Amino acid sequence: MAEIARATKSESVRQHIVHLIDAGLQPHDRLPTERELADEFAYSRLTVRRALDQLEHDGIVYRVQGAGTFVSDTRIAKSFELTSFSEDMRARGMTPGSQSAHVEVRPAGMKVGYALGLSPMEPVVHISRVRTADGIPICSEDCYLPERLAPGLSEEDVAGSLYEILTSQYGVEIERADQVIAVTVLEPAHAEQLQVPAFSPAFHIVRTSRDGTGRAVEYAESVYRGDRYSYELTVLRRREASGPA
Amino acid sequence: MAEIARATKSESVRQHIVHLIDAGLQPHDRLPTERELADEFAYSRLTVRRALDQLEHDGIVYRVQGAGTFVSDTRIAKSFELTSFSEDMRARGMTPGSQSAHVEVRPAGMKVGYALGLSPMEPVVHISRVRTADGIPICSEDCYLPERLAPGLSEEDVAGSLYEILTSQYGVEIERADQVIAVTVLEPAHAEQLQVPAFSPAFHIVRTSRDGTGRAVEYAESVYRGDRYSYELTVLRRREASGPA
DNA sequence: AAGTGGTCTAGACCACCCG
DNA sequence: GGGTGGTCTAGACCACTTT
């Protein structure tokens, strides 16, 4: 029930409209017009429009020029958003954990250095963990951070969410990540870690996470068991417009 | 080189800034201030801000309150966007095609009816195809559309991009899609279609595509060979704000 | 013709960063 | 303190849909 408070007027309008919809509006019902909402709140129309822009982007409402703004016909409203393993598992109703966490500092090397935009000699923190959900091993992860971003990271720190530690202890906010998802079969070593037969099918996910400035902050390679994990996302179709060729 | 023309002023500002960056600005270089750009174009500051909003969302620039707007440090700017198989393959420099296309109309049934929000008795067009890239089979796809959206769809129509046909012939614009990506091993029948050994690892992708109003327009189940396909995407971290619990 | 969303203007004040 | 981005106002005109 708790909404996260935000000081802006447009956010309060957004929440009001979400409540309107939850209060019983059906898909394709028309919302109050922008001018009605502006009058009701005594805000400018532009402020109301910003709230509706957000809801439209999230797929909650759609707008038809000349006709009005309507509730979307969406049963599921999943996300194309980056979540940490911990957040992901909690969202699925499971309890996240870690096993066999190991942390060491070593030179980046070619592959990791290239991905993080560092010299191969620059030190990185290498974190290797087996991530669990309700105690069941789900994925084996090797994650690398520039050491100067997270000096003194310990094995106790990485028992839970790395993203939370980065934010709370080091002030690093991850904003976006590029991922490449491939399929593979598990090598015997990984299979044993994950407690499945050797050569079981699995996801192989390579991720480079970046902060708001686009600077690479984390490079990770993970192997997820295919029998216990699937990847869900919502993707948007590109609007007509593009950068140069 | 060709930019897609758009009538809005903010779009012209956006393109101008993209050109500025391409003309030699380096990551973390500062852009002209919003007020400078507004003066230069003789537009209002809000119009300039809309252009910068777009560029910020796309990860091209970042803004620091009190300091300025800067070029992002991003080597790769991939997308979290929905592309058709044909577009996807062309983007990878390959030529898309289809084999064994088969089209039939039949009742939706429970699973497809549920996904498309139709009665199980309502007719759907079932399209089954093997998609190829440079003549190599990449995926086997079963796709279902409500028949009333695409009456008279023929096997010749589905040799190429279904999304393009939907737009050009039926006026249906797909805006977003929910996808569930899992791993599997290929059954012998699929393996033969895709010309790989039986029990090779593969992606199993289930997709429900929707138009701007959120109405389900397409339900598809695809199997992609794992040795020739990987899934790349960029995901954004959720801003702090949320709907009700 | 009336009403809707789409775009834009010319200001204003605030919070924040930097020299 | 001066300049930056963040938010907001009270209008205006346009393109479009609906009656």
Image (tube, coloured by chain):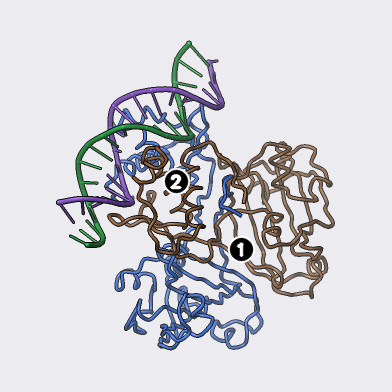
Chain colours: A blue, B brown, C green, D purple
**Residue closer to the observer: B197 or A178:** A178
Residue at the disc numbered 2: B51
Could you tell me the amino acid type at mark 2? Answer: Ala
Q: Where's residue A217, x and y in %?
A: 42, 72
From this view, report whether residue A95 is shown above or below residue A191: above
Residue at the disc numbered 1: B181
**Residue closer to the observer: A218 or A162:** A218
State which mark lies toward you, 1 or 2: 2
| Residue at 68% over, 49% down | B112
From this view, report whether residue B229 is shown above or below residue A79: below
* Mark 1 vs mark 2, CA separation in Å: 34 Å
| Residue at 62% over, 81% down | A186
SS of the residue under disc 2: helix
* Chain of residue at mark 2: B
Q: Where's residue B227, x and y in %?
A: 71, 73
Q: Residues within 10 Å of mark 2 (few under 14, many from 20)?
A: some
Could you tell me the amino acid type at mark 1? Answer: Ile
Q: Where's residue A143, x and y in %?
A: 47, 79
SS of the residue under disc 1: strand
Q: Where's residue B157, x and y in %?
A: 80, 45
Label number found at residue A2: none
* Chain of residue at mark 1: B
- Are the residues under badges 1 and 2 in a single subunit? yes
**Quick one: label 1 or label 2, which is nearer the N terminus?**
2
From this view, report whether residue B47 is shown above or below residue B72: above
